[in-house]
Image (spheres, helix red, strand yellow):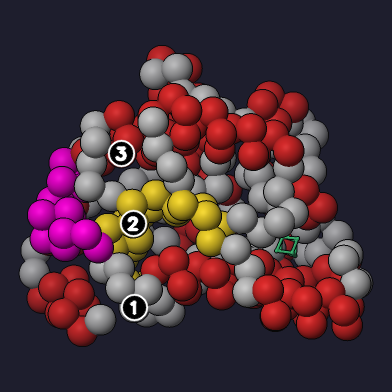
Amino acid sequence: MDNTSDIYKTTQLPDLIGHVSMQEAVGLLTEQFPGQVTFSTSFSMEDQVITHAILSAGLAVSVFTLDTGRLFAETYSVWSATNEKYGARIKAYYPDRSLLEVYLDQKGPNAFYESVANLKACCHIRKVEPLKRALEGQAVWITGLRAEHSPDRQDHQVVEWDDNNKIIKYNPLLHWKTAAVREYVDSHEVPYNPLHDKGFVSIGCAPCTRAIRAGEDFRAGRWWWEDNSKKECGLHVS
Ligand code: SF4
């Protein structure tokens, strides 16, 4: 959307947002773009921080998730607990049925272990295409991206223009450390995924996520059979 791009590129808004608290920033964004600010959650601990900030303050932000169909049972439990705690109904976007049926028919259910091309295709169908639909008509996408999670994520900015999705992206927790996330969740009694207590750092689809061992890189828990250069699913292109 051209107007959004113009506002991002020609006004002081991005700079201002980068220097105020998360709630103030969201307030400024919803004022500038009423009804066009959205937050994507995977129910990870960092996403739960943002969910709490939005839903407990009644901020005018829509909250959605991408249900890939391959999530952990624990993820559905924390989703349900979150709806219950905040009286919310977090909207889910699902993979396009016809795309998924063709892919599964041709490749089988676990083809992502066989090649990078299959992995990318699965992520495209289960995540990237539904995300495009979720972001349609929106001006601002809030995410729980944290730089600590991978070298690629260190290239992101707290406020940035996402040319791929033609949207302003706001990553309020980009520079938060794990201890700060944990402290926030504990002190605000925010529901969180119990897999985090079992060594899972970043929690995605069950067949592609594992716990990490002491001393391992955070990204070791995702797509561990591939090398590090292939460990992004296409949602966050910096
Ligand atoms: S993370 Fe794994 S199961 Fe999930 S969409 Fe990507 S390849 Fe498919």
Query: 186 or 15: nearer the eye?
Result: 186
Query: In the rendered structure, which segment of residues is drawn in magenta?
Result: 24-36
- Residue indicated by mark 3: 54
Residue at 39% across / 31% down in the picture?
87
Task: Check disc 1: other Cα within 10 Å, few if <14, some if 14-19, many if 20+.
Answer: some
At label 2, which amino acid type do we have?
A: Thr
Q: Residue 96: tell me if it is visible.
A: yes
Q: Secondary structure at mark 1?
A: loop
CA distance separating discs 2 and 3: 10 Å
Q: Estimate the x, y position of residue 78 in percent, counting from the top left.
A: 58, 32
Q: Estimate the x, y position of residue 184 in percent, counting from the top left.
A: 41, 24
Mark closer to the chain start, 2 or 3: 2
Viewed as shown, does residue 47 lie left or right of 196?
left
Q: Estimate the x, y position of residue 230 in percent, counting from the top left.
A: 71, 69
- Residue indicated by mark 2: 38
Q: Residue 20: tell me if it is visible.
A: no
- Residue indicated by mark 1: 166
Magenta stretch: dominant SS?
helix
Task: Check disc 2: other Cα within 10 Å, few if <14, some if 14-19, many if 20+.
Answer: many
Image quarter in which the N terminus is found: bottom left
CA distance separating discs 3 and 1: 23 Å
Task: Check disc 3: other Cα within 10 Å, few if <14, some if 14-19, many if 20+.
Answer: many
At label 1, which amino acid type do we have?
A: Lys
Mark closer to the chain start, 2 or 1: 2
